[in-house]
Amino acid sequence: MVEAVGTRPWQAVYGLPRIVLHRALQAVPSLLVLSVAGFALTSATPGDPLTARMDRQAVVLMTPEQRAHAVHLLGLDEPLPIQYLRWLVRAIRGDFGYSIQTGQSAWKVVSAGIEPSLILLVGALVVIVVIGPAIGVIAASHEGSAIDRALSGAIVALLAIPPYVLGLVAIFVVSVRLRLLPPGGMRVAGVPLTFPVLLQHLLLPALVLGVANAAPLARYTRASMLEVLSAEYIRTARATGAPEKAVLFRHAYRNASLPIITVVASLIPELFAAAIVTETIFAWPGIGTLAVQATESKDGPVLMLIILIVGLTTMSANLVADVLYKLADPRVVVI
Amino acid sequence: MVARGWQSLRAHGSAVVAACLFLCVLILAACIGPELPWLHPNTVDVAHISSAPGWSHILGTDGSGRDVLARALIGARTSLLVGVASASILVAIATIVGAVAGYFGGVVDVVIARCIDAMMSIPLLLLALVCVGVFRPGTLTVILVIGLLGWPPTARVIRAEALTLNHRAYVTAGRLAGMRSDQIIRWHILPNLVPLITIASALQLGIAILLESTLSFLGLGVKPPTASLGSIIEFALEPGVFDNQPWIWLPAAVLLVGILVSIHLVGDALRGVLDPSMRRDSPASRATKPIRPATVSDQPRPSSDTGPIDGGEALNVEGLRVVYNGRYGETVAVEHVDLRLARGEIVGLVGESGSGKSSLAMAIADLLPPGPAISVGRLDIDGQRVALGRGKADRRRRRAMLGYKVGVVFQDPSASLDPTMTAGRLITEPLRVHESLTRQALQLRLSSLLERTDLDSVPGVSGRYPHQLSGGQKQRVGIAMAIACSPLLLIADEPTASLDVTVQAKLLELFRSLRADLGVSILFISHDLAAVGQIADRIAVMHRGRIVEEGPTEQVIRQPKHPYTKGLLASAPHLGRGRGKLPIVRLDTPYAPVTTNE
């Protein structure tokens, strides 16, 4: 079937590419809104507008004529909408301006934090995906019992406790009192960064970040399992004579876990927020620490770039989740 | 109204009551405490700098010699005030935006939805950081930032609700009566949003307090001399304080966690009270009542003997009783029923909805959901007594009989097949559970089962998912599952009720051939006397949980003895005749089974 059904060009595309295309096109307006907000922010940042766009050393050495020329060249004397378009073109080409704090290009400053942040986020996601569903399944399969009440209580507590309080208490207990793990940082100065060293430093922040954010998933899994467990096909599964454990995992969890992918994706913005404080208290050299430093030094271009990266990551995560969900559920037909 | 609300809150358990009390005491303490002369938060005690908890200062003093308890109380006051102020702004904006988007729809809605999407893709904390970076940090900045940036999630929820309200009849009526948009929004939409807004306010209050404390903790929120819980916890980051003087930051942390957990609990309880879609029976009211020990029925009465049947019994139930314990007291679904099935016999169990047929069948298979109390005098399957204990071992033994000795076919094939498994996988499930077969043997059994149930004519059937099959095909899959291990007894619970007449006829044919070829006994449950008449050797009529008449099919249909059976037969629809009415059978009608055979 190659013929186009609809009138719009992407409707001639079928299968997964169509879903991806459709969702990507939907994200474009959101990204534009984001970029307008980001631009407004960069312009509103107090300080010399030139230093946010050029190498600082060059600005300091400029004569007034050169300065006026640079302002004209950069279009800073033009109306704001034109400035925005120029900024957009530069941003698409990968030029995000210069950090006010260090004078380096904003991309250089921010990209240094991407890898550590990714390591921490992946670590936390592993923790979330392991303990969230586990708590949910155990609570649901013991509905109404003491185990269920204890776990549900823990879920409420984890939903309410601020991640940084959890982090402080964890450092206090694990690192200060028990001296089991290093209290912060990503490496030991002067020692090459090997995997065991990394893991040793990663364990506590990833656990804190993961545990603090597993509660929504646990709560969701519990509710979803309870719903599935009362479905008629679970009775059919029991009628095959399968032991209760097999019913729980082979039939109930398989069905209850379908939307979990979407839930995990929806957790990502919150995860970033929690990562900002977690990185700060664990002195983890990631984007979150950078964001706090940039805020303190009013570094507009760096903040702007961080916002764009986080926004883009969130939207891509949602897109990936949508695609995975459609692949996992046989009832969703991919046309 | 308030009293009723309190009642419902209390119903959510002691934790919610404790949370309410904690919040009340804390608000009082935060209001009064710092005003007391001996608890002034800014008084410096030079004699006690960073002193541990003791008699002069219950919780100790901080690095400037200020009382930790007084600081924590003033911090709680700031946190609560900032939280309430910013949550109010946030909810107000969210309500207006959500109501407008939901009411007007169209382009307005799309534009607002895109803006909400964009804002929600950035964590609120990061947005707040950026704005604090641009403006001057301080209490007012924090309130405005949270209030002006935090509304999108709430607006999204309110928009969805407004969208459904918009299609209600009274809104349409208002529009037809010539009301202006703002009047409809103010009089019809907003009042109906109140429960949702109340729930959102509680949740957002918690989020606002959390965000303020996080910003202050990062040094980007309230500035000295103002103190909030977050800025007190920030002392933990000072060298030496964190590990050596934990009393300086721990009380504020404990207080903050207490506030957040309490608000969360109250918010959840409010949701339970106000949100009708969240209402469900609390687990306590559905708890399983202890099962009475298996004893022979309390009221021994002559068993409904149908005479000796050659080849032994497939099923023998004596004194089965199922009682549901609901909100309105006990409901007896099955009252001391005795039932026997000979090998190869088809017994039809008929009765109207609610007569207890399905409860009886599911109780035999031990497939009733937890809730009802079941007691059985005696249950024999294949001439062997089944252990009826509630212990793990007995339950496991009963479960192991299912799919192996007892197959069950359910009523609604669309709901009773696992949607994530293909037909082939579903049909072989019982084989995988009970017999360890090689891949080839499994394949062989599958194809013979498909042939047996006439599914082999459907191309690629074993690779199809239930939603890709028709109703009749799905029920054939259900039957193939039930007979996969060649059981001795088949319990078919209204297997044709949800299918049309032609499909029904073919399925009845299938059941008959199963009996002929496999020698399986079938307990065929139906409210359709015509269907049962075509297939059953004997018919048992059930009414109000009791078997009121039992006998050979011919006899029950031609010469019914019990008034209820007569009524049931008379009310069966016939072409060209008007509808008869099913008579109300008085409770004092004799319910002991009327034995109709010699």
Image: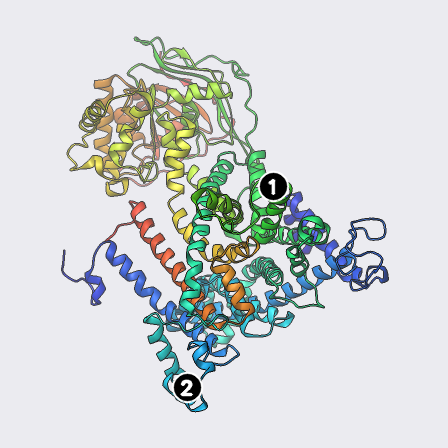
- Left or right, B485 with reference to A305: left
Please report, as a chain letter, where disc 2 is located. Answer: A
**Place of residue B460 in the rendered image (x, y in percent of width and height, measured from the top left):** 17, 37
Compute the Cα span from label 2 to label 1: 56 Å
Q: Quadrant of residue B416?
A: top left
**Place of residue B97 in the rendered image (x, y in percent of width and height, measured from the top left):** 49, 70
Element carrying mark 1: loop
- Whether discs 2 and 1 lie on one chain: the answer is yes
**Place of residue A250 in the rendered image (x, y in percent of width and height, measured from the top left):** 37, 34
On residue A319, which mark appears?
none
**Which mark sits nearer the N-terminus, 2 or 1?**
2
Would residue B46 be visible to someone looking at this image?
Answer: yes
In which quadrant will I find the C terminus of chain B?
Answer: top left
Amino acid type shown at disc 1: Arg
Residue placed under numbered mark 1 in the picture: A179
Please report, as a chain letter, where disc 1 is located. Answer: A
Q: Residue at x 38, y 56 (%)?
A: A318
Q: Is residue B220 above or below residue B491?
A: below
Would residue B154 be visible to someone looking at this image?
Answer: no
Q: Residue at x 55, y 57 (%)?
A: A280
Residue placed under numbered mark 2 in the picture: A71
